Image: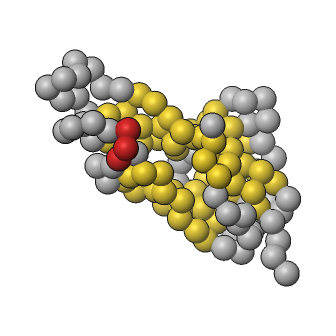
Amino acid sequence: MALRFPDKDPDEKLDYTVDWSRYLAGDVTIASVVWKIQQADGTALTFPVGYAFQGDELVVASGSTIGLTANSQTNTATTATIVLEKGDPNTTYKLLCEITTTTSARTSAPIVTNRKIVIKVRERV
């Protein structure tokens, strides 16, 4: 199941947050977050800040880049947020929010899991 967010206009810079709190039990928290973006064949590429996904590949973002661009990424103990800008109109992007958790008295090893996010870019008139 993928998390769906409202459509994004290419001119908008918006934040997208995944709240993991209901999946984290007791004193388990988010230790690290990696954002990824899926290529057409389903392969997921790490989506670092300052890069754009354009033409099914990652490129260094610039003033002329039109692909979906990772502007910033932050997280708390229970949430992960990515700020996205630009994006090709009439394109659907699939991102993965992958977290690694801390260990606790009940868990002997960290858990690594992810959630898929679907974002459609559409021009608003």
In the foreground, 5 or 49:
5
Q: How is the image coloured?
A: secondary structure
Farthest residue in the left direction? 105
Quadrant in the picture for residue 102: top left
In the image shown, does 47 or 19 lie closer to the viewer? Answer: 19
71 vs 91, left or right, is left
Residue at the far bottom in the pictured view: 125
Quarter of the image holding residue 52? Answer: bottom right
Which residue is drawn at the image coordinates 75% and 57% (left, top)?
A: 120
- Horizontal side of 58 relative to 111 (left or right) equals right
Quadrant where the C terminus sits is bottom right
- Picture layout, residue 82 above or below residue 38: below
Q: Which residue is drawn at 21% across and 37% down?
A: 26
Residue 82, how many percent across, how many down? 51, 57
With respect to residue 106, does 88 lie above or below? below
Q: Position of residue 114 (x, y in %)?
A: 50, 35
As drawn, which residue projects farthest toward the top? 108
Q: 106 above or below 119?
A: above
Percent x, y of residue 5: 64, 58
Tell me if residue 104 can be seen.
yes
The residue shown at (37%, 33%) is: 100
Residue at 42% over, 37% down: 99
